[in-house]
Image: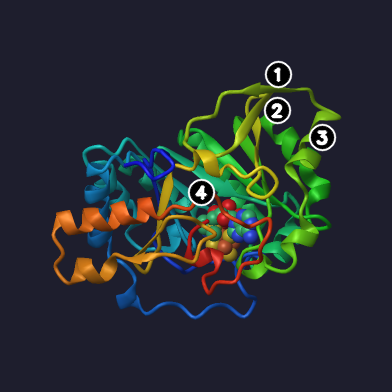
Amino acid sequence: MQDVFCRNIDYLRISITDKCNLRCVYCMPEEGIKLKPHREILRFEEILRLVKVASGLGIKRVRLTGGEPLVRRGVENFVRKLIQIPGIEDVAMTTNGILLTSLGPALKRAGLKRVNVSLDTLQSKKFRKITRVGDLHQVWEGIETALDIGLHPVKLNMVVMRGYNDDEILDFVKLVYLYPLHVRFIECMPIGEADGWAQKQLVSQEEIKARVAEHYPLEPCDSILGSGPAQYYRLSGALGSVGFISPITAHFCPTCNRLRLTADGRLRPCLNSQWEIDVKSPLRAGATDAELRDIFLEAALRKPRRHNMSEAVWNQPRMMYQIGG
Ligand code: SAM
Ligand code: SF4
């Protein structure tokens, strides 16, 4: 499937829930959220049907996200079925890692290949401050489980925020000498809860890279397995690598290859665009595969050339946990 700018769309990010067991300051309001009623959330069978249609259009890679994907009951069985869909070559997940120790082995048996774990600090107190409710120990155990059971590669996502965790950039780099982890530094986006302060807190990719390069020579390397926008660097003698994801200061829209499916059944062509198309209602009204294909094609055709996060604020109702990152 191609969009009007000749980008090949072969990647679908699927949010399977808007629920989460954390309350990260940049993502969710402290008081919690008003969850969508259960009937509004796509059932797993519905998502499987949509992925079958999408794979017929050239979607090859799928990432499960949320909210927190591991809080949705039955996710292991869902992953098993997803992997069996002809044409789907890769199924991965982005998780906060809290439930990885308990669910990782079953997911691995189901065929999950790899995980990205979001972790913004290596300090317990700060972890509690950023996530408001979380226990760092559980996430770290989850990361070790992922490494032990061979979910590979394991990538860590660190959203860098000035004054919160930018003092830990080098501590995260040290991790890649100790473990085969791929640490990705992500610029905080002015989305949802972070709207209004992300720009003030922004630490640019250039600054992060300079801070790392002052202590560690960085050699550019090919992307680590996956289809994301990170630029990776090897460090001599390290087991893993570091990567930089810079949606704000060096947006990667020209190579954007993805569509997003929200938990409540909307297709979104761009994280930062308000436009989305309802695929759940036609699906539930008995749409044929051909009709569903047309909805995917329309979503692809409506992909904007680029997002405008660096110029504008987030003036739309959806929060990050409702889109999936
Ligand atoms: N709960 C899972 C997790 O945290 O990994 C998956 C959903 S979460 C919305 C997906 C990713 O979006 C996480 O890596 C999170 O750090 C990132 N994220 C959320 N809000 C963000 C923001 N304002 N700027 C940059 N990344 C953000
Ligand atoms: Fe939950 Fe992930 Fe959002 Fe944190 S970033 S509140 S873990 S959905």
Q: Which residue is mark 3?
A: 210
Colour basis: rainbow
Query: What distance separates the C-alpha of mark 4 from that of mark 2?
Result: 38 Å
**Residues at circles 3 and 2 in contact by the CB criterion of under 8 Å:** no
The tag on residue 237 is: 1
**Residue 265, placed above or below residue 247:** below
Q: Residue furthest top?
A: 236
Q: Amino acid at mark 4?
A: Arg
Q: Secondary structure at mark 1?
A: loop
Quadrant that contains the N terminus:
top left
Residue at image coords 65%, 76%: 30
**Residues at circles 2 and 1 in contact by the CB criterion of under 8 Å:** yes
Disc 1: CA contacts within 10 A as few (<14), some (14-19) or many (>=20) = few
Label 2 CB sits under 8 Å from any ligand 1 atom: no
Residue 249 at what x, y percent from top left? 70, 46
Earlier residue among tags 4 and 3:
3
Q: Which residue is mark 4?
A: 305
Earlier residue among tags 3 and 1:
3
Residue at image coords 80%, 26%: 216
